[in-house]
Structure formats: structure tokens, C-alpha cells
Image (cartoon, rainbow, N blue to C red):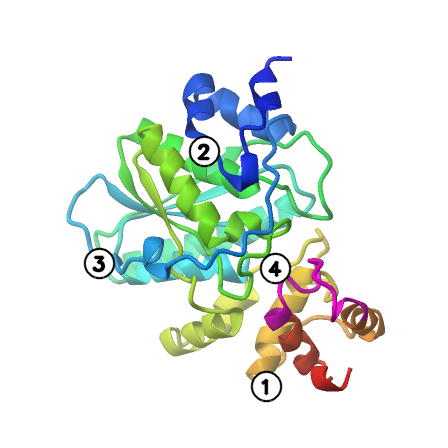
Amino acid sequence: MMFDIYKTNPFLDGRIEAENLLKLGVGDYLQAVASGEGLPIWTDLQEQLDDCAQNPDRRHIVHDPSFRVFVPVSGGLDSMTALAMAINAGHNVCAVNVNTGAEYSAREAKVISWNIESHLNAIRDDGSDQQLTFHKLNVPVGYKKYEHVDRGRNLIAIVAIAELALTKGWWGELWFGNVAEYGESGVIAGDKSHRFFIEMNVLLRSASLPVEVRSPLGALDKTDLLRWWFYHCEDAHVWLQNQWSCHSDNSEHCGSCSGCWSRWVAFKELSMDAIPSMPEIDFSAKLQLAKDRWSSSQTTSLAHSKTRLIRYLTAMGVDPEKM
């Protein structure tokens, strides 16, 4: 096997060892992760790390023509908010969609295209010399997925974007659209955790890749993101209508996957109907799953943490204390 180096457990306890990236080079490293041979095994990390370690207040204008804020975009609420915040802050922005071959990739592409063009039009209308570029990188994964999730997709995205920066002669910050409600949740959201981003920055520095990962939404939840849109944009409903949070490639949001549920809860907490609208769904199966998992430490697609599960139940009109 070409990637026998990975048989020596290079991802011990969720740590990503930079020497493997250095030995293989970026291309083979990404291929190894995408093939599943170098797939990280995230552990349930419970460490409470200082937010300042990966959330420094660096959202200021850097007057260097080679500086960029890189934003991985998937078309959903989180990444679209990170993109809008970076543009709103006046940075030169590079939006990047890393296509790993998910079934909803085509739907994502349409949504992302609309958003990028709309942001470009807004920049032109302002008469600004601010720059916004868009790149699509294809790194198809070759292993069995967990539901819609490509384990390691975020690792692939970060390293691929860092290589893009290197080839363009750019440097800067990679703003990841993770929100606080995911937390340190191990198997499913391990690659959105504080520990993961810190380890990624160690890897990037060790490999002399010119990007540092930041999580500007790390202290927020999806409801906070909606508040941001309504506060900053008179036409917020138009932007929200043209986002895609669903894990299917249907013409409309299915209303039942975890992406739809997270979005639905956020709007529910603002006493609003979801934008885009979602079909009427039967809550009974979700409610039963919540009851079954209430006292369990297992992660699920319904709730990555107990805090998030409480929010789901409350949005459904269920008092968790009476379960």
C-alpha cells in the first residue's frame, strides 16, 4: 500500500502528526485521508481549552495585498455567515468550496454561486476596491461515510485551502464557520472542536503553510447567526432564502435531517417560520430518539451535546425535566 505510513497510528488520540504531511507532501497526504487509509479517529476530547488559544480578536483590516481571509463555504447558515462577516469587515476574501463528492454537492454549488455573485454585486455597488475570489477544489473521498458526514472533510478542506494559499502567494486566516452548539463532541463533530483547530494550526505551522485557522463564530449558536443577519441586512430574508442546510439533494429542504433541524430550531427560538420554508414533519420519531438518548453519553445526529438536545426539546414544546 502506498500509505503504509498511516498504519502506525499517526492520529493517536485525535492528534494530527505534522511529520506525515511533511513526508508525503500535501497531495499524497490529502489522498491518504480521502481514501480512508489515513482517516483520523476522533476521540471524545473533554478538555476545556482557553478560547483565546483559537479565538483571538484579530478581525481587523490587514493592509497587505497578499493577505486574505479564506472561508470554506458549503452553502449553509454557518459558512455563509462567516463569509458575510469577513466581507462586511472589509477584508479581501477568498471563498473556497471543497467538494468531497457528497450527494448534496450539486445543490450546494447552486446556492454558493448565487451568494458569491450577490456579494460581488454588493461590493461593486459600494464602489469598493475590496476583492472577493471563489475557488472550487475537488477532493472526492473513497471511504464509507457516516450518514452524510465525510469524517476528515474539515481536515481535507483546511490543508487544501492552505496549499491554495501557498500556490497563489497569499497568506492569512482561515475563518471556519463552526458554532458553539457543537462543542467538544468527539466522533461526529471532533473536527469542529477547539482541540482540532489548535492541532491543525500546529500542523500548518510545521509544514510552513501560510494559513492560520480561526473560529470567529465559536462563541455563537445558530440563533445568534440569524440575529446577525437581521441586524446587518435589510434584505436578510433574501440571503437566508438562498442558503442550503439540508443533507439531501432535493429541490426543497427535507425538514427532517440534522441540518434542517438545527436551522428549524434557530428560527423557532426567534418565534419565526424557517427560511427557506420546510415541510410539515412528524416529530414523534425525533422525540422518541431524544427520550432514548437523554441519559446516554452517546453522540447522535439529533444532538451533539446535551445543551443542544435541550434546545431541540424546548423548540418541540417538550420540558426535558419531565422526560
Q: Determine the CA span between mark 1 and mark 2.
A: 40 Å
* Residue 160 marker: 2
Please provide the residue range marked out in magenta. Answer: 292-308
The image position of residue 259, as x and y in percent, is 64, 61
Q: Residues within 10 Å of mark 1 (few under 14, many from 20)?
A: few
Q: Amino acid at mark 2?
A: Ala
Q: Amino acid at mark 1?
A: Ser
**Which residue in the protein does label 4 denote?**
245
Q: Residue at x 62, y 65 (%)?
A: 305
**Which residue in the protein does label 3 denote?**
60
Q: Determine the CA span between mark 4 and mark 1.
A: 19 Å
Which of disc 4 and disc 2 is earlier in sequence? 2
**Which residue in the protein does label 1 denote?**
271
Front: mark 3 or 4:
3
Looking at the image, residue 51 sits to the left or right of residue 130; the answer is: right
Q: Which secondary structure is most common in the magenta stretch?
A: loop
Q: Compare residues 307 and 173 and report the one nearer the observer.
A: 307
| Image quarter (top left, top right, bottom left or bottom right) of the N terminus | top right
Q: Amino acid at mark 3?
A: His
Which of disc 1 and disc 3 is earlier in sequence? 3
Q: Are marks 1 and 2 in contact (CB under 8 Å)?
A: no
Q: Determine the CA span between mark 3 and mark 2.
A: 25 Å
Q: Compare residues 111 and 216 and report the one nearer the observer.
A: 216
Front: mark 2 or 4:
2
Q: Determine the CA span between mark 3 and mark 1.
A: 34 Å
Q: Residues within 10 Å of mark 4 (few under 14, many from 20)?
A: many
Q: Residue at x 36, y 74 (%)?
A: 232
Q: Is residue 313 above or below residue 129?
A: below
Q: In which image quadrant can residue 161 be found?
A: top left
Q: Is residue 257 above or below residue 43?
A: below
The image position of residue 176, as x and y in percent, is 43, 52
Secondary element under disc 4, as helix, strand or loop, is loop
